Amino acid sequence: MRLQTIDGETATLRAEIAALPKRLAALETRLAAEGSAVEDAAKALKDEEALKRRLESDLKDLQQKIAKLRDQMSNVKTNEEYRAFQHEIEFGEAEIKKIEDSELEGMERAEQLAQKRKAAESELADSTKAVEIEKEDARAESAEQQKKLQELTKRRAKERAVVPEELLRIYDRVSSSARVTGIAYAQGQRCMGCHMGLRPQMWNQIRDGEIMTCESCGRLLFYDASREPKPLAVVEKPKKRAKKVREAGVE
Ligand SMILES: [Zn+2]
């Protein structure tokens, strides 16, 4: 029973140890996602700045063109020519208005993007710090787990050394199958592992101190008189049973 307790603790510990790298990987994934949010915001902001420079340059070109047109307009001879220049200047001014509107919109977008980037950066900084702390905890936990595992392994070897080989063989076979436990208490004429009833003969032998295997689940059955519920009435019955046990033992 002590060996089974140790094996149970070992299985739980191994599951915890296996879960740790997954937990760390999830943290790294979260950091990576937040990192790319910062990059995305920075890239969008850079694109916005490039657009602004382009608009600025287009604006300058148009202003120069209009200044030139005004120069040329002062030398025209006919009304027709004058109107043509005026038309072209008006067209250029309308273009300038459009560019100025675009610039305003761009400034608003840039402002929002800068805020977004700042928020993403501070989120990333917070997470980086939190993840560092969690990693440090995980390292400490991992060291603790390894120490505990070594301890359990040592205790396991010690317990196995005192169990007869034949019983160990059965225990190992049953506990390595789909069932988790290799040994169970026999109690109230039942196997407490699978809850199936035991034949009277077997129940007697078990109570007589023999270690037997359950016929339905294969677990080693172990009897502990202190676990048996106190008999309600009739004091005679146990005596009869005790006699039977002796008879069974003779057989
Ligand atoms: Zn059973």
Image: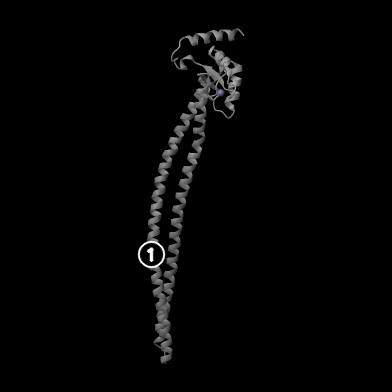
Nearest to the observer: residue 68 or residue 188: 188
Residue sitting at the far bottom: 78
Q: Residues within 10 Å of mark 1 (few under 14, many from 20)?
A: some
Q: Is residue 37 visible?
A: yes
Instruction: Name the residue carrying label 1.
Output: 107
Total numbered labels: 1
Nearest to the observer: residue 173 or residue 152: 173
Q: Can you say whether 33 is above or below 242 in the image? A: below
Q: Can you say whether 234 is above or below 2 in the image? A: above
Which residue occupies 48% across, 14% down? 225
Q: Can you say whether 107 is above or below 140 in the image? A: below
Question: Residue 243, located in which quarter of the rendered image?
Answer: top right
Q: Residue 41's spot in the image, x, y percent? A: 43, 56
Quarter of the figure with the C terminus: top right
Residue 196 left/right relative to 98: right
> Mark 1: which amino acid?
Met
Name the quadrant where ligand 1 sits: top right
Q: Is residue 163 visible?
A: no
Q: Residue 16's spot in the image, x, y percent? A: 49, 33
Q: Can you say whether 122 is above or below 61 in the image? A: above
Q: Secondary structure at mark 1?
A: helix
Q: Residue 30's spot in the image, x, y percent? A: 46, 46
Question: Residue 182, located in which quarter of the rendered image?
Answer: top right
Which residue occupies 43% across, 86% down? 84
Beta carbon at label 1 within 8 Å of ligand 1: no
Question: Residue 218, located in which quarter of the rendered image?
Answer: top right
Q: Residue 73's spot in the image, x, y percent? A: 40, 86
Which residue occupies 50% across, 36% down? 19
